[in-house]
Image (cartoon, helix red, strand yellow):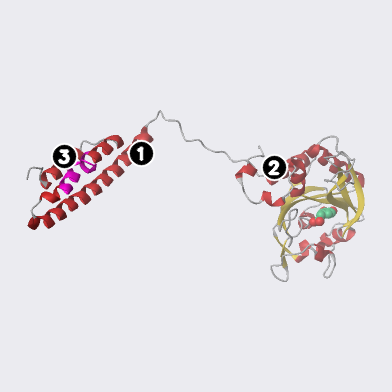
Amino acid sequence: MSHKSIQEVRDWFFQDLKEVKNHEEILKFKGKFLGKSGEITKLLSAIKTIPLEERSDYGKEVNLLKNETLEELKKKQELLEQEGGQALETDLTLPGVGIRRGTLHPITLVIRQVSAIFERLGFSVESGPEIETDFYNFEALNIPQHHPARDSQDTFFIDDNRVLRTQTSGIQIRTMENRKPPIRIIAPGKVFRVDHDVTHSPVFHQIEGLMVDTDINFKHLKFVLRTMIQELFGESREVRFRPSYFPFTEPSAEMDVSCFACAGKGCRLCSQTGWIEILGCGMVDPNVFEAVGIDHGVYTGWAFGIGVERIAMLQYGITDIRLFYENDVRFLNQFPS
Ligand code: DAH
């Protein structure tokens, strides 16, 4: 045979492979053996020159060699990649991998903002269980069985006696049971209702407020709530109170804030009224005091409840409540904390 024998090419391949040190060299090396005029390719095309009776054995042998060398090349390539990775890890001159910092969720931001305002006014921040008994969610709040107010708060029931709380108002009851007046608390937390559209979510957040002492009247309520609104939305916001109804307050009121978009002239955001409804409030009903054993001949108090999503939507101009719960970082990153 005029050409190199299969064994020779094989030895040559393994000898040279040891010298290959990087990706470029491996490409060159591959060309030398398996390229168009590579040594193994030459062996393959030499099959025509092999006497007929040896041809089959020869063909098998060259093909075996080809497969073996392809396999070896693959292994070598993997090895080089691994070594390259290790080299990268130990190269101290390379820039570090950046750490991406998260931001606080807009709902958390609003809860913290409101809490800070009330803490300055001497209120403490309280919490209560999300699974609440009928007594704390309804009964003690002057909402007896069959009261129509139960229907207006489409409730998720756990069993006959327990519900996912529909309002944070139950925390008023828990606080008054455990503490003597003077009481000044706010209570932020999740609440749950069977409701779902662009402005309603089955899980949302409320902040409850309660103040109880001797001689507490509606003027204190007005002052505190106006202070909160002006701190949240700016000094130029005005508030107004409209008569309303809640079972746990008497009298009850709904508070509106002057429209952000038109400053009272009337626009789409405020349905042409100049005012945006923002919370419910009132003087604590004597029946509620009775349920917790506070003497309503001595003490008076007020309470309010506000929706956190509603504040955040107004503050940041968000029109779809679902954005709060989708956890899309492109949305969440827009609220610097
Ligand atoms: N719990 C009421 C609601 O979910 C909000 C509310 C209104 C709370 C008046 C109060 C209050 O404490 O006095 O709609």
Q: Can I make out residue 58 in this image? A: yes
Q: Which residue is mark 1?
A: 85
| Residue stretch rendered in magenta on the structure | 32-45
Contact, mark 2 vs mark 1 (Cβ under 8 Å): no
Ligand 1: give its quadrant.
bottom right
Residue type for callout 3: Gln
- Residue 128, given in percent of the width and then of the height, sits at 71, 55
Tell me: 178 left or right of 224: left
Q: Can I make out residue 217 in this image? A: no
Extreme residue in the top direction: 93
Comparing marks 2 and 3, which lies closer to the viewer? Answer: 3
Asked which quadrant contains residue 260, the reply is top right
Please name whichever residue, 180 or 284, is drawn nearer the observer in this view of the structure. 284
Please name whichever residue, 161 or 167, is drawn nearer the observer in this view of the structure. 167
Q: Which residue is mark 2?
A: 109
Q: For the residues marked 2 and 3, what is the alpha-carbon distance in whole angstroms? A: 67 Å
Image height of 163 relative to 253, above or below: below
- Image quadrant occupied by the N terminus: top left
- Residue 321, given in percent of the width and then of the height, sits at 72, 51
Disc ID at residue 127 = none
Disc ID at residue 15 = 3
Residue visible at 20% across and 49% down in the picture: 66
Asked which quadrant contains residue 252, the reply is bottom right
